[in-house]
Image: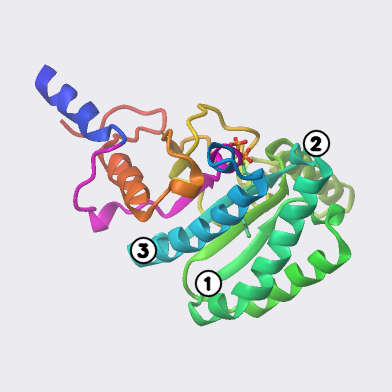
Amino acid sequence: MVTKLWRRRKDAEPGAVGPLDSTRIPLHIAIIMDGNGRWAQKRGLPRTFGHKAGAEVLREILTDAAEIGVKVLTAYAFSTENWRRPSEEVSFLMELFSTYLDNEVDRLVEKQVRLRFIGNRQRLGAELQRRIESAEQKTAQGTGIELNLAVDYGGRAEIVHAARTLAQDVLDKQLCIDEIDEAQLAKRLFTGNQPDPDLLIRPGGDMRISNFLLWQLAYAELWVTDTLWPDFTPRHFRQAIFAYQQRERRFGGLKTSK
Ligand code: FPP
């Protein structure tokens, strides 16, 4: 018994990787793309170089996720708190999102990726908002992996937004107070009818959620690595999925089999 437990923990350590079980691929993976600034600074480069490198890594991981059979990938690109960063860094990131849309949208359409921006887009520039809407429209028929890019996103703000929508629906007599339940709130989140993330991956070593998908991550498995996001490779991604597959998910219940 002791040996079995020990073995399970060891397999689950970051670093171990083996063949993936195709019957237990996480449907939804969330990623906090952290460590860009440190990656650049370690190389004596401005932090923005790290963000640019991070955008390339996202492209690679999206391709791998689709290949593995993941259905939804949600990537944290800019939080509601990131506006506090120096204005040059914020402007650079906004420009990077715009350029990404310009350069990537045709490829996303070709690969059947369905793109959504989640977050409060009113604070983004008019041109970026226009590109977001256009990219979402162009990819709306995509039948492959769904990519949620969280920009000006905060989990608390998202829950407040959903609560306001519920209140409005009650005022409009679309809903009775007694009908408010978890499902009613969940479908008013930006992730709507998508499944909750099964796995949260956090590069950069910090052991926190950082206001990301607070509602949706309730039962997600967490996987943290010290590797910085620009150094993150499909091998790390598969390590995370492999570790996930060794975990026993109980959702608050008890173990189902010996
Ligand atoms: C956190 O690292 C990262 C961000 C705030 C930006 C993430 C954005 C990208 C990876 C670019 C994604 C691009 C597109 C086009 C969607 P940090 O800067 O906090 O790093 P640090 O912890 O080392 O300072």
What is the distance, in whole Å, between disc 2 and disc 1 at their CAs? 32 Å
Mark 1 nearby-residue class (10 Å; few <14, some 14–19, many ≥20):
many
Helix, strand or loop under label 1: loop
Residue shown at the point (55%, 75%) measured from the top left? 108
Q: Nearer the viewer, mark 2 or mark 3?
A: 2
What is the distance, in whole Å, between disc 1 and disc 3 at their CAs? 12 Å
Q: Is residue 46 visible?
A: yes
Which corner quadrant holds the C terminus? top left
Which residue bears the numbered disc 3? 69
Residue 94: in magenta span = no
Query: 199 above or below 172?
Result: above
- The answer to whether marks 2 and 1 mark residues whose Cβ atoms lie closer than 8 Å is no
Left of 38 or right of it: where is 237?
left
Q: Say if disc 2 is inside 8 Å of ligand 1.
A: no
What is the distance, in whole Å, between disc 2 and disc 3 at their CAs? 37 Å
Q: Amino acid at mark 2?
A: Arg
Residue shown at the point (50%, 49%) measured from the top left? 230
Q: Amino acid at mark 1?
A: Val
| Residue 89 position in % (x across, y down) | 75, 46
Residue 19: in magenta span = yes
Residue shown at the point (23%, 45%) measured from the top left? 17
Which residue bears the numbered disc 2? 84
| Residue 36 position in % (x across, y down) | 57, 43
The residue lying furthest to the front in this view is: 44
Which corner quadrant holds the N terminus? top left
| Residue 192 position in % (x across, y down) | 63, 55
Which label was assigned to residue 113?
Answer: 1
Mark 2 nearby-residue class (10 Å; few <14, some 14–19, many ≥20):
few
Residue shown at the point (63%, 47%) measured from the top left? 186
Left of 19 or right of it: where is 208?
right
Magenta segment, which residues?
15-39
